[in-house]
Image (cartoon, rainbow, N blue to C red):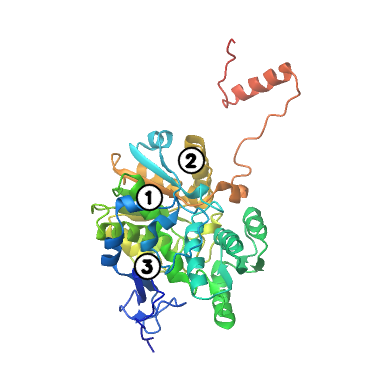
Amino acid sequence: MTQAIDTTQKQLSPTFTKLVSKEGGIEYEPKALYVCEETFSPLEVSYDYEAIKARVSRASIEAGPKSIWRYKPFLPVATDNVIDVGTGMTPLVKSTRLARRLGLKNLYIKNDAVNMPTLSFKDRVVSVALSRARELGFSTVSCASTGNLANSTAAIAAHAGLDCCVFIPADLEAGKVLGTLIYNPTVMAVNGNYDQVNRLCSEVANTYGWGFVNINLRPYYSEGSKTLGFEVAEQLGWQLPDVVVSPIASGSLYTKIRKGFQEFVKVGLVDDKPVQFHGAQAEGCSPVAQAFREGRDFITPVKPNTIAKSIAIGNPADGSYAVEQARETGGSIEAVNDAEIIEGIKLLAETEGIFTETAGGTTIAVLKKLAEAGKIDPDATTVAYITGNGLKTQEAVQGHIGEPLTIEPKLGSFEQALERARTLERLDWQPTSV
C-alpha cells in the first residue's frame, strides 16, 4: 500500500515535502524509504522549487558557509541542526599542463581528493544522510561500502555522536580499512564483493532498524552529490560547463551532478545550456559501459575484477539512468583497463600535482581516451571530477613508479647519484652560482 502523506507535519522544510518514485510518480512520506512498493523503482526527494526560488539568490549563497550547507534549501534536511564538518567547496583547478598534453584549452579538475573530513566526495553524501538520519531519530548508522563511504560514515558519525557499524568487502585496500578503524566504529569485513555486502546490509537494515546511508536513507544520501554540480556552476562564474567527465559506480553521482545543474536552471541561478556527460568505468567492472556500447537500456550484472575497487559495483542501482543520461546529452560511457587507470593516476600527478585514487585514475584515463578520439571539442569548457585521494590506494601504483636514490651524506655520493638520474632522463638540474 502507498503511504498517505501527512501534509500537516510542521517540522519539514518548506522546500521538500515528499518522496516520489522515479517510475510512476507514486508519492510517499519523507521517511526512511528507498524503493517504491509498486514499481520497485528508486525514490527521489521532491522539492518546491518556487519556495526555493523565493529564498535563494547568488548573493545569499555566496554569503553562506564555506561548505555544502550554503546550498541547504536544495538539500533534504528540515531543520538548521545540520552536521557541518566543512565538507565541500573543494578547488576547481584550471588545468594547464594536463590540458596542453590532451589538446584541451579549457580543462578544469574538480578536486574532491582534498574534501573534508576524509578526502573523498563521499563526505558530501554522508553529511546530508546523517543530518537527515538524526532528524528521523536514528541513533545507529551504517553503510555498505567499497571503502570511501565507510571512512566518511565512521568519521562523521563520530563527530555527531552516533553509534556506527559499517560493512566492507574483506579485501579492501589497507589505507581505506585503517581510514575507517581510526574513528572506532564496529567494522564488519565480509568475505564477498560489494554486491554481496549490500545484500547483507539490506537484511540487517530490515532486521535491526538502523539507518543505512546508502540503503534506507539513500534518497537523502544521494542528494548530497548534487553539490558537486552546484559548486562547479558557482566556481565557473555562475555558468554551466560544456562537458563533464565523471566516474560511474552505482550511477548516482553521474546523474546527480546533472540534477544539480538542472535545479540551478529551474530557480534562475544560471542560464540553461546543453552539457555533454561522459562516464568512466574500469573494464573489470563496466556493466554501465557495456550497456551503453551495446545499445541496451538495461544493465546486466557483472562480477568485479579490477584495481578500481571504489567504483567496482557489479549491479549498479542507477546504471540504466546513467545510460539514458549519456544518450540524452550526446555523451558516452567508456571503460579503460587497469594499466590505463594506473597511467591516469600518474598523468594527473605528473602534470597537475594531484594524487588521486583509482576512481580518479579511471576518470583521467577516459578523459585522455575521449580527447585523443576527438570526442571532446578542444574549446569546450570541460570539467573532470576527481572523487578520492591517492593516499587511500597506494597499492595500485606500487611497482609502477620510481624509487629513491639512496646516497651517503657526501657531495660526491650525491653527484654520482645525480649522474645516474640524468642517465635515466629523470632529472635535468644544473648547479647554479650563488
Q: Which mark is residue 290?
A: none
Q: Mark 1 — residue?
A: 63
Amino acid type at circle 1 is: Ala
Residue closest to the eye, 21 or 132: 132
Between the residue at mark 3 and the residue at mark 2, the CA separation in whole angstroms equals 30 Å
Q: Residue at x 42, y 70 (%)?
A: 219
As drawn, the residue found furthest toward the top would be 433
Q: Residues within 10 Å of mark 2 (few under 14, many from 20)?
A: many
What secondary structure is marked by label 3? helix
Labelled pair 1, 2 in contact (Cβ < 8 Å): no
What secondary structure is marked by label 1? loop
Q: Residues within 10 Å of mark 3 (few under 14, many from 20)?
A: many
Of mark 1 and mark 2, the one earlier in the sequence is 1
Residue closest to the eye, 202 or 15: 15
Q: Position of residue 117 (x, y in %)?
A: 55, 53
Q: Mark 3 — residue?
A: 320
Labelled pair 1, 3 in contact (Cβ < 8 Å): no
Q: Residues within 10 Å of mark 1 (few under 14, many from 20)?
A: few
* Vertical comparison of 412 with 166: above or below: above
Residue closest to the eye, 284 or 277: 277
Q: Mark 2 — residue?
A: 348
| 366 left or right, relative to 164 | left
Q: Residue at x 51, y 71 (%)?
A: 133
Residue closest to the eye, 387 or 316: 387
Of circles 1 and 2, the one toward us is 1
What secondary structure is marked by label 2? helix
As drawn, the residue found furthest toward the bottom would be 1
Of mark 1 and mark 3, the one earlier in the sequence is 1
Of mark 3 and mark 2, the one earlier in the sequence is 3
Q: Position of residue 226 (x, y in %)?
A: 39, 59
Between the residue at mark 1 and the residue at mark 2, the CA separation in whole angstroms equals 33 Å
